[in-house]
Image (spheres, coloured by chain):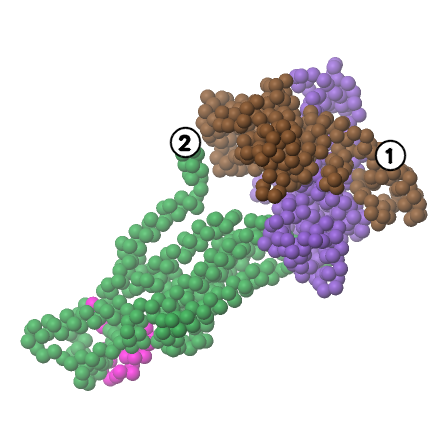
Amino acid sequence: MAVLAETRRVTKRFGTFTAVDAADLAVASGEVVGLLGSNGAGKTTLIRLLLGLLRPSGGDALLFGVLPSMSTRRRVGYVPQTLGLYDDMTVLENWSFTAAAFGSARPVLPESIRDSKDELVGSLPLGLQRRVAFAVAFSHEPELLVLDEPTSGVGPLSRARLWQDIRESTEHGAGVLVTTHNMEEAEQCDRLVVMVDGRVAADGAVADVIGSRTVVQVTCDDWRKAFAALEEEGLIVQVQSDALRVPGSPGQVEEILARHNLAATVATVPANLEEAFVSVVTKGTHR
Amino acid sequence: MTWGLELASVRFGTRTALDRVTLVAAPSTVSVVVGGDEAGKSTLLRALVGLVGLSGGSSRRPPKSEIGYVPATVGLYVDLTVEENLAFSGGAYGVTGQEFAHRSAELLERIGLADARDRLGGQLSGGMQRKLAVAMALLHRPGLLVLDEPTTGVDPVSRSELWRLISAAAAAGTAVVATTTYVSEAHRASTVTLLDQGRSIATGAPAEIVDAVPGKLGVVRSAVQPRGLSWRWGTTWRLWSPSSVLPEGAEPVQPEFEDAVVIASLAYERGV
Amino acid sequence: MWAMIVKEFRQLKRDRRTLAMLVALPVLLLVVFGYAARFEVSNVAVDVVGPQAEQVAGLLRAPFQVVDVDPAAGKSLVVSRLRDGDAAVGLVTGQRPFLVLMDGTQLFAAQAAEGALARMTATGKAGGSPAPAIAVRILFNPKLKTSWIMIPGLTGLILVFIGTLITSLGIVRERQSGTIEQLAVMPFRPWDVIFGKIVPYLLLASLDLLVIVVVGKVLFGVPFVGNVATFALGALLFLLVTLGMGVLISTVSQNQGQAIQLAIMFVVPQVLLSGLIFPISSMAAGVRWIAYVLPLSWYIDIGRGVMLKATPIKALVEPLGVLAGMAVVVLGLAMLRFRRDLAPSVRGGGAITADPAAVPS
């Protein structure tokens, strides 16, 4: 498993503002790494450092073991959030343009998008547009793929299909770096890197990031009153179908509900990825 | 008084955007509509609030002054400050003076923008813009709150805060209808409607939808896509069989809500 | 690099508005500079009055075109006809010297007339007959100052600019940011939204108008001798036309770039063909009809007439009427289209609401 992209304690400062602070990140061939973080956490800056669009203020950012350059650019495929496709050209025309730009010998359109080759990109549904964007980025067979929110706004089935395309590319030896806000998507990654305020706050498989965090689950007949009661006490309550989930200890929760004369069932359950993420982020910012 | 759509259809020329969809929006509940990008989610919401006319069926909604609507494009003024945006909404819905001061302070506190009153809408992050837009729609305590993809593209922390805002509104009595492409969010609702190409292919509480999943679900750990109706799940494949028998090599597994949604969509697509 | 070129062409071929501009603009410029951009007036409308009217009228050749001969009338008729814009030059016979009155607001007609008169007396002298004593008096713009006739036209230009371009941008901005949908769901009536959007621009334009007239007077000495109410009426009607155009453009544009393109196509012909720079009377007959279709042409009539000549309102019935008609048509169309954006059309099944009065139209 060759390491394709790597940052070693890379730092980037803009004036007095530190966007990225001693961050370590690695993407190896055959794996999908998910980069999570709030807006302004430094995800975009980190990616730019990796792609060679920015020069580090400290530390190293290496692509294929060397500093990013024109030749390394040919080995990277990038799909920005805005897709980077021309709405007023057909799928085939977009494909030809990229092929010509990268100098690839006009490979064949992949099956997944072949049926719509003569349609204007702007007229395709978003799910299909995203698959086209991915295919176009992969057309010159890059070793590293960087995808910015690849399935944002796309339905469940299209998401599954797009992830199929992504997985297939790793089977060809590519390494994929994905930024995402979507927990379902994060769960598809082999490894997660969580950024908070420019620092890497967590790095590991999904299960490792969740760790042993738990929340208290409350089932109550009058969920509205329970919600109001818990909120009043300053607890952060999330609603999940017909149950409430609150961080904290079961004893604390039971006591609050008892004070408001509410009968409820209280249980400790493992946290889900979103709750773990929120906890990592809020802990991180209170350092 | 419940609101909603009953067997509502919307046609644009020859294209049917919505086909006999029924949706119930009851006070103090959160109804979520899940679907892909061309499923018709926006059309459904537009039909509900009266932005498009129905070609069939009926809709029930309160008067405009009791509806709060946040379109997918957010709909706030980027060249007005946070305060000015709220004031505009207040003026439009007749929430002024003391009531406005009190209510806007309360909402700004809730969404964490109390110290950012004078920041321009365009200077807020995506997540904050959405929170402000939802606050604007809640200013007049509407009976019906309608949100079009409120959390698409929003970072997880803001998304979680948005959902608290939405839940609080429901707890206070509002009927909430929201659309999303995130299946995990649909899980938060008391009623979920799965929309595909304008048709409602599954509806009910999340647990009901999972129970209603036909056939059997299995996990296949192989490098190649197994034959049959299957889709990726991390490094494994999920394989679904319409009958109660799974093919060889598939370990049976209990479907999660996410699985149920994919199964429903697959089944509908294959006409199974 | 070749790939970039091919790509640009492909995109261009599908961008209909830009293509239209690429074709329309050169055609427009050709028409203008081929047929319309002339300063020489070949047709000067002349009134002849006084006892020797008939004889003198017979002597007049091109560029003079006799439009009225009235031996019984005198100087006052000529002055009022010049004021009303019915003639550019008037000859008052029956007195020594002959009085030639010219409308100074028709700059180029006056110059043409002067030149023609000089030629006539020269040939007369050469032919031996004594030069008749002629007194030339230029009315309304005695020094034939260009700024005097440009400033009223400029007021029109400002009104077009604010009315059309800026209004359309203001409305398209809402469409781009998605806030128009919101407005449609809020308890606003379509009327509230449309007028709410137009009124600020109406006020701004009126203010600008005032500033220009005042600056014109102070800096260039441009007079304002006519009836303010008449001027205001003309300006208002013209504004309504341009605002309506602005709203109309916004209903067919998805973004500000498109709105600007359309607005340019509306403004540029008016700048060149409305008589602002090149007199309408010197345009080739085949293209002169274009000027009559442009609202700015009619406004300039009113503006110049009222500011410089104190033209009474009854003489301006035609331009006022045309502007009013245009306003009705354009605004009507604009409102119709804009309402469709704000209120849905209910086809087939009805909508049941708790408050029947809230059923959208």
Q: Whole-Å distance between the Cαs marked 2 and 1?
A: 62 Å
Is A50 rendered above or below residue C88?
above
Q: Determine the residue positioned at 41% across, 31% down.
A: C1
Can residue A170 be seen in this snapshot?
A: no
Q: Determine the residue positioned at 37% across, 45% down.
A: C22
Chain letter belonging to callout 1: A
Chain letter belonging to callout 2: C
Queried whether the magenta region covers residue C76, the answer comes back as yes
Q: Which residue is mark 1?
A: A268
Q: In terms of image quadrants, where is residue C149?
A: bottom left
In which quadrant will I find the C terminus of chain C?
A: bottom right
Q: Are marks 2 and 1 on the same chain?
A: no
Hue used for the chain lettered A:
brown
Hue used for the chain lettered B:
purple
Provide residue A236's location: percent of width, then percent of height: 80, 44
Determine whether, in the image, residue C70 is placed left or right of residue A1: left
* Magenta-highlighted residues: C63-87
Q: Which residue is mark 2?
A: C1
How many numbered discs?
A: 2
- The residue nearer to you, when weighing B138 against B33, is B138
Determine whether, in the image, residue C48 is placed left or right of residue A41: left
Q: Determine the residue positioned at 76% across, 39% down.
A: A283
Q: Helix, strand, or loop for circle 1?
A: strand
Is B209 rendered above or below residue B113?
above
- The residue nearer to you, when weighing C273 against C66, is C273
Hue used for the chain lettered C:
green
Q: Helix, strand, or loop for circle 2?
A: loop
**What label does residue C89 carry, if any?**
none
Provide residue A147's location: percent of width, then percent of height: 60, 31
